[in-house]
Amino acid sequence: MNRRKFLSLTALTAGGALVATAGALTLPNLVANGEPGALLRTARPLPPAYRVPLPIPPVLAPVRTDPGTDYYEITQRPGTISVFPGVATPALTYQGSFPGPTIVSRAGRRTVVRHTNRLPHPVVVHLHGGHTPHDSDGYPGDLLLPVGTATAPTMAGMPTMPGTTATGTRDYTYPLNQRAATLWYHDHRMGFTGPSIWHGLAGFHLVHDDEEAALPLPTGDRDIPIMITDRAFDAEGRLIYPSLDPTLTTTPGVTGPYANGVLGDVVLVNGAPWPVLRVDRAKYRLRLLNASNARRYRLVLDPPATFVQIGSDGGLLRAPLPQPALELAPAERFDVIVDFANVPPGTQVELRNTLGAGSTAQVMRFDVTGPAVRDDATVPPTLSRSATLDPRTAIVTRDFLFQNAAGRIGWRINGQAYDPAHPLARPKLGQPEIWRFVTDLHHPIHLHLDQFQVLARNGKQPGPYDHGWKDTLDLYPAQSAEIMVRFTDYAGRFVFHCHNLEHEDMAMMADFITSA
């Protein structure tokens, strides 16, 4: 695609018209309110809402430490989760649970996680939001084969992948030279990220630092990680997903009706259906993560209350930001404070999704209990003094069109299906750059290696959810945006892609190679 064609598409998008290039609109699978994806329906009565307590993923203890490093071990293995009363639902798990155990790290202190693969197919682990060297970033071709497996399966229709292959175990090294933030780890294998996460391979990784620790924010039992997902189940209570290859070994992708994303009708929060959290009359810090494959959420509190946003994907904002609602695309995180101090005891506060309907309009409930309690937490007017990037210093501007093309594997960036032999960018480390994105349909765009800042949408100001440092940008249909990024520290091969997992698995991804 030449520059003239790209700029014509940008002009169409900035004016609000729908991008209508050949093959761009071959997928009619939009639910009634214009959201992406097609709905899978559960084939048994749905579990009752607001009956089970919110699970809190256990914090994983290191197996050993030394003066500079904490060492962890995680086994990926088949397990079960509890969604329906009395039914054990098979799942793919980290350490036997969904979500996997939470890893808690300190910025600047190295974390090494040894993963052992006892699943029946290869895996890859990506620390989403991590500032990580390329050999531990979770490049989709860096396979970890099951214990005892000699060779990797050949994937139909996919290009030859660079990368390294390990058998049984692999150590992932995270220097964590980055700010405090809510990160998450998940499978990132080429062509099979969607079904792997859908079946359970996701967990939190929280990073703390001195700047955050100096703030009087809620801590301990009032600092709650909340992973929101949607899923669907068969009549026996087993997870269903429309894979072309249910063995998750050779043929990536989904059946045709679900090419624009897979949606479920059961909302799980930390693995439980529509759970309840009993809260004191005090401030709570909620670390909200949308870990769904394709579903977007617009979260509100009912009775109405305000979220005070204190952080985004890449850590603390410079100042708190009141938000009456929050829109989360897949992979986005919002760090918020909710104050229950003035809520009468006995009040039931629902967290609702106004982009959902029926069962997917509900997310979870907070039950406010007892008299007012001592609460020393406050939200100071200044949260962080993190630097901002100056667009006048940008050395390069790069253009990327995210678009559908006809065919089963039909998602493209700049007209190109994923091909690691043709990286779409070769940025220099330390060089400020502006990246411009244009979309046809909804695409949450994720960059590996470094966080970025949003400069503009459709040539105007950033949106209400673009504040702070981001690693995932939710772009609406027929929209353009500009971001500014500076890649640092680590030379090598990385990827950027759509985080609608069905789009990603069907080739909406590209390599970029950093160099000194």
Image (tube, rainbow, N blue to C red):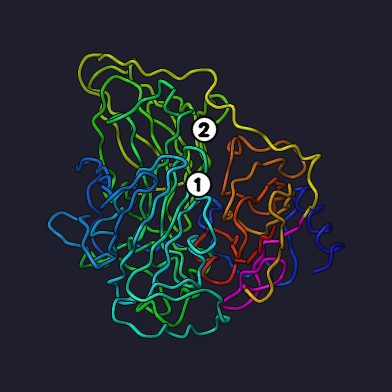
Residue position for label 2: 316
Q: Is residue 42 left or right of residue 215?
A: left
Q: Amino acid at mark 1?
A: Glu
In this view, 196 is above or below 82? below
Q: Which residues are magenta?
A: 398-419
> Which quadrant, please, contains the C terminus?
bottom right
Q: Picture quarter containing residue 42?
A: bottom left
Residue 218 image point, x, y percent:
36, 25
Q: Is residue 362 visible?
A: no
> Which quadrant, please, contains the N terminus?
bottom right
How busy is the neighbourhood of tag 2: few (under 14 within 10 Å), some, or many (20 plus)?
many
Question: Is residue 403 found inside the magenta-colored segment of the image?
Answer: yes
Residue 39 image point, x, y percent:
42, 61
- Secondary structure of residue under mark 1: loop
Number of marks? 2
Q: Picture quarter containing residue 173?
A: bottom left
Residue 222 image point, x, y percent:
31, 29
Q: Amino acid at mark 2?
A: Leu
User: Which residue is pictured at 60% across the width and 67% down the height?
Assistant: 508
- Which numbered dot is residue 332? 1
User: Which residue is pictured at 64% across the width and 68% down the height?
Assistant: 404
Question: Is residue 410 found inside the magenta-colored segment of the image?
Answer: yes
Q: Nearer the viewer, residue 272 or 337?
A: 337
Residue 192 image point, x, y percent:
44, 71
